[in-house]
């Protein structure tokens, strides 16, 4: 299997990203290289993580010159905003998605595996399992987005936005969820998706995407693969979640982290403890058995 691991990160997640790298080096096989995509201002901070199979990539190699980061005045400069003449100000999590899509144009690998920087591998993992019989595993969870539940309003907005960008007339919203981490994208399909967006919108794909803050690259890729590309010979649908994620809530203590990790399903090889929960990376390191 020809696969690159891809992580978009930022300075606030540096220690978590370091832990991700250590867990990859200790437990992951079957990949060619690991690419970490960061803002240009963060390059020096992340450069110590580089190695024989790990590259730190500046977003200036990926984003157009008209999309630039600036200090957020509403946060006294502690956070960043990305400004462009073609849409509203974007947050870091929007731009991280743009980086992940953009890197596909520069990859020789057949598959790219998306990993959030707060993921930690806790079990051995051969990336080759994501390409069974030559088809790339394609994460999709049907019937999992209620169309009338306010808790899923963002999912529905992301689905509608994907439909607009892809030129889908119906349904504008679907109940299928494609959002996860430790998921595989077929590189050629990402390139085909951006070309399709340009054909539909008459704009560069980047300019089309920055026109709204409603953006989910997983939803966009998922609906493209399922409703536009339609190549079952290239994609193998799967409901398996390779990573167990703690999305929100109070910071986890050492005992709770151990319990969370112990409760993994057989197919789950990693945990993702969202950084905004405030869970101490030192405790995550211990729970992952990395020191």
Image: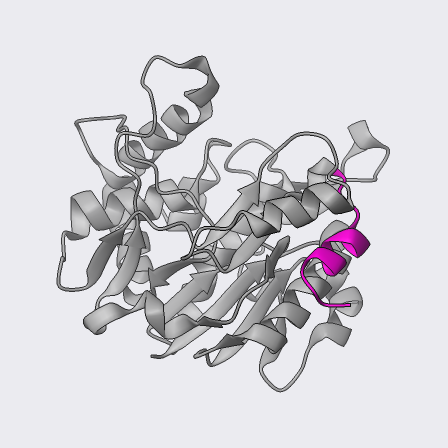
Residue 208, compared with residue 102, is above or below; it is above
In the picture, measured across the screen, residue 190 lies left or right of residue 25, that is: left
Task: Residue 280: say if magenta.
Answer: yes
Tell which of 188 and 285 is nearer to you.
285
Tell which of 188 and 281 is nearer to you.
281
In the picture, measured across the screen, residue 62 lies left or right of residue 107, that is: right
Task: Residue 123: say if magenta.
Answer: no
Question: Which quadrant, please, contains the C terminus?
Answer: bottom right
Q: How many marks?
A: 0
Residue 265, compared with residue 62, is above or below; it is above
Q: Residue at 71% of width from left, 36% of height from top?
A: 277
| Residue found at the very far right of the displayed protein | 76
Q: Residue at 64% of width from left, 52% of height from top?
A: 118
Question: Horizontal and vertical percent for residue 167?
Answer: 22, 36
- Image color mode: one colour
Question: Which quadrant, please, contains the N terminus?
Answer: bottom left
Q: For residue 76, say whether it is visible.
A: yes
Question: Quarter of the image holding residue 135?
Answer: bottom left
Question: Horizontal and vertical percent for residue 85?
Answer: 55, 38
Q: Residue at 51% of width from left, 32% of height from top?
A: 213
Residue 145, compared with residue 217, is above or below; it is above
Q: Start and end of the magenta stretch?
A: 278-291
Tell which of 166 and 70 is nearer to you.
166
Question: Horizontal and vertical percent for residue 9?
Answer: 64, 56
Q: Residue at 18% of width from left, 43% of height from top?
A: 227
Tell which of 250 and 170 is nearer to you.
250
Residue 203, compared with residue 26, is above or below; it is above
Question: Horizontal and vertical percent for residue 233?
Answer: 13, 63
In the picture, measured across the screen, residue 63 lies left or right of residue 101, that is: right
Q: For residue 66, say whether it is visible.
A: no
| Residue found at the very far bottom of the displayed protein | 52
């Amino acid at each position: 299997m020809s696969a690159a691991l891809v992580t978009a990160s930022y300075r606030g997640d540096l220690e978590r990203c370091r832990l991700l790298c250590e867990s990859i080096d200790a437990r992951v096989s079957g990949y060619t290289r690991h690419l970490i995509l960061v803002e240009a201002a963060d390059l020096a901070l992340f450069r110590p993580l580089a190695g024989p199979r790990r590259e730190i990539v500046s977003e200036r190699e990926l984003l157009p010159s008209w999309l630039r980061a600036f200090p957020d005045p509403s946060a006294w400069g502690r956070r960043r905003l990305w400004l462009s003449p073609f849409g509203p100000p974007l947050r870091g999590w929007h731009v991280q998605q743009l980086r992940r899509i953009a890197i596909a144009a520069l990859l020789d690998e057949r598959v790219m595996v998306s990993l959030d920087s707060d993921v930690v591998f806790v079990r051995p993992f051969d990336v080759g399992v994501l390409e069974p019989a030559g088809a790339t595993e394609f994460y999709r969870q049907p019937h999992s987005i209620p169309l009338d539940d306010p808790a899923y309003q963002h999912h529905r907005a992301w689905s509608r936005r994907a439909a607009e960008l892809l030129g889908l007339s119906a349904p504008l919203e679907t109940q299928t969820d494609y959002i996860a981490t430790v998921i595989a994208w077929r590189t050629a399909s990402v390139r085909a998706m951006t070309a399709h967006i340009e054909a539909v919108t008459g704009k560069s794909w980047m300019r089309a995407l920055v026109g709204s803050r409603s953006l989910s690259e997983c939803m966009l890729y998922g609906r493209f693969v399922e409703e536009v590309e339609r190549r079952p010979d290239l994609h193998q649908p799967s409901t398996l979640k390779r990573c167990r994620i703690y999305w929100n809530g109070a910071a986890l203590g050492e005992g709770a982290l151990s319990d969370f990790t112990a409760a993994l399903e057989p197919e789950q090889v990693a945990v993702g403890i969202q950084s905004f929960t405030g869970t101490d990376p030192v405790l995550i390191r211990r729970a992952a058995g990395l020191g």
